[in-house]
Amino acid sequence: MHISGATRVCGIIGDPVEHSLSPAMQNAAFESVGLDYVYVAFRLPRGETRVLADAARALGLRGLNVTVPHKVDIMSRLDSVDPQAEAIGAVNTIVNDGGRLRGYNTDAYGFAEGLKARGLAVSGREVVVLGAGGAARAVVFSLVEMGANVTILNRDAARAESLARDAVSASGREVGWDPLQEEVLEARLGAAALLVNTTSVGMSPLSDVSPCPRRLLRPRLAVCDIVYNPRPTLLLRDAAAVGATVVDGVEMLVRQGARAFELWTGVPAPVELMRDVATRELD
Ligand code: ATR
């Protein structure tokens, strides 16, 4: 990689951040399209977003990705926030235009693009989302925007209700919610076209568990798991075994990154290359 006096700097802020796949993915992408850009990871402790916003302006950082624990905190430090990110209540990408910082949420876009790439249309279909945390927010908002009939199931039902209420007020669509229990899941999956896991159940090192019993899966129920470590998760292995269409978590990761790349550079992202790099890093 060639670094010059004119190299533009992008990066990711988070804590922890050292295991992020984004530096490998973004630097490979910059290099492949011949852009004089570099992407680095900055570990930023919780509560330090004001310092970060000032530093980004002062140093002329072109763009940032934002991850745990800053996605919500950062919003009040920005000059403007894209309406979709505002509705979701979280920013994962910042663009610095001459000192003016604008926030976006490319997780929602990345999720939607991943479904489209698999030929999954959700408009007017029943979709069950497991989980109601930060990752679920982008997924649920993306689904209601695409016209899906969403039901949120979460261990802590109050959290599911709260996310459902936010999604209803942003979209005007009906959004259901219930506690995450096997009987409820069984009843809800009967009519569903798609199941999306946004919980951390099945994530390494506790990778021998699945958030959905295998007996509830069937060929006509597409399954998306945003967990990408391990790859595939037990849920996706079970879904593939019954012949269902599966969408793995790398797809959302790659496509949120591709969208961020395009916002910073104005150049179409090399999505295939980014997927290859992310997959290789995971393996
Ligand atoms: P993220 O930003 O990755 O979504 P989070 O906000 O901590 O992280 O949310 C984690 C999600 O995984 C939540 O929906 C959580 O359920 P609760 O809200 O009930 O805590 C869910 N989750 C984590 N461990 C779980 C488990 N063992 N069983 C069921 N759900 C679990």
Image (cartoon, helix red, strand yellow):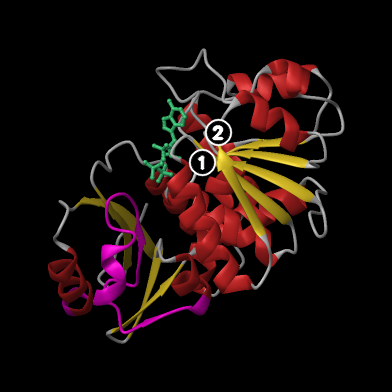
Residue 93, quarter of the rendered image:
bottom left
Look at the picture and state if 60 lies above or below 109. below
Q: Is residue 41 left or right of residue 110?
A: left
**What whole-number distance in Å separates the C-alpha atoms at marks 1 and 2?**
8 Å
Residue type pointed to by label 2 = Leu
Circle 1 packing at 10 Å, graded few (<14), some (14-19), many (20+), is: many
Q: Which of marks 1 and 2 is nearer the N terminus?
A: 1
Residue 180, which numbered label?
2
Mark 1 CB within 8 Å of ligand 1: yes
Residue 37 on the magenta segment: no
Look at the picture and state if 105 lies above or below 69. below
Instruction: Depth check: give the residue in front, 92 or 168.
Output: 168
Tell me where residue 87 appears, x and y as whole percent.
Answer: 49, 71
Circle 2 packing at 10 Å, graded few (<14), some (14-19), many (20+), is: many
Residue type pointed to by label 1 = Gly
What residue is pinned by disc 1? 131
Mark 2 CB within 8 Å of ligand 1: yes
